[in-house]
Amino acid sequence: DVQNYIDRFQEVARMEMKKYLIPASIKLAQGIAESHAGMSREATEGNNHFGDAMQVMAYTTAWENWRAHSVLLQRSYPELFEGSTSYEAWAKGLKKAGYSKDRNYDRKLIEIIEAYDLARFDR
């Protein structure tokens, strides 16, 4: 399931990285973690791949949700865009900014990125 998700969304993640400067590895890891690799009810029924942060509306397409999530990160967490572009810094920054209630959110993202070598999409 995870590899299928990566195959399906790697280009979207790269496009979002080019437009919004969010590491593709972070976007992919967030999508994998928050949508259970696209298998959650929110993802399958409402195209919501980013969980609680994006539950305010239903999305026509997954791409629409990915774009809305990038805009949310840019508007709500501007401090993330001021520092390092490394996935480690972003994961820790998301935790510090309070993006997730999960106290281990940063470690979860880093583990996913390293397990699936998602950093290769940041190049």
Image (cartoon, rainbow, N blue to C red):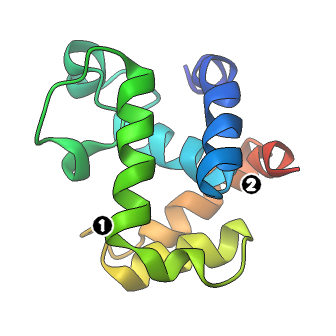
Q: Which residue is mark 2?
A: 114
Q: Amino acid at mark 1?
A: Ser
Q: CA distance from mark 1 to mark 2?
A: 20 Å
Instruction: Give the left or right position of residue 20, taking residue 60 as reference.
Output: right
Q: Is residue 32 above or below residue 11?
A: below
Residue 100's disc is: 1
The secondary element bearing badge 2 is classed as helix
Amino acid at circle 2: Glu
Percent across and percent down for residue 45 are 20, 14
Image point 21% across, 27% down: which residue?
Answer: 42
* Disc 1 element: loop
Q: Is residue 6 above or below residue 102?
A: above
Q: Nearer the viewer, mark 1 or mark 2?
A: 1
Residue at point 63%, 47% (across, down): 19
Residue 101 in picture, x, y percent from top left: 24, 70
Image height of 72 relative to 82, above or below: above
Q: With 37 as the anchor, is 2 left or right in this view?
A: right
In this view, the residue in front, 119 or 104, is 119
Q: Nearer the viewer, residue 110 or 98?
A: 98
Q: Nearer the viewer, residue 60 or 100?
A: 60
| Residue 38 visible in the displayed image | no
Res. 46 in view: yes
Q: Earlier in the sequence, mark 1 or mark 2?
A: 1
| Residue at position x 44%, y 76% in the image | 78
Mark 2: give few (<14), some (14-19) or many (20+) Cα within 10 Å. Answer: few
Q: Quadrant of residue 56?
A: top left
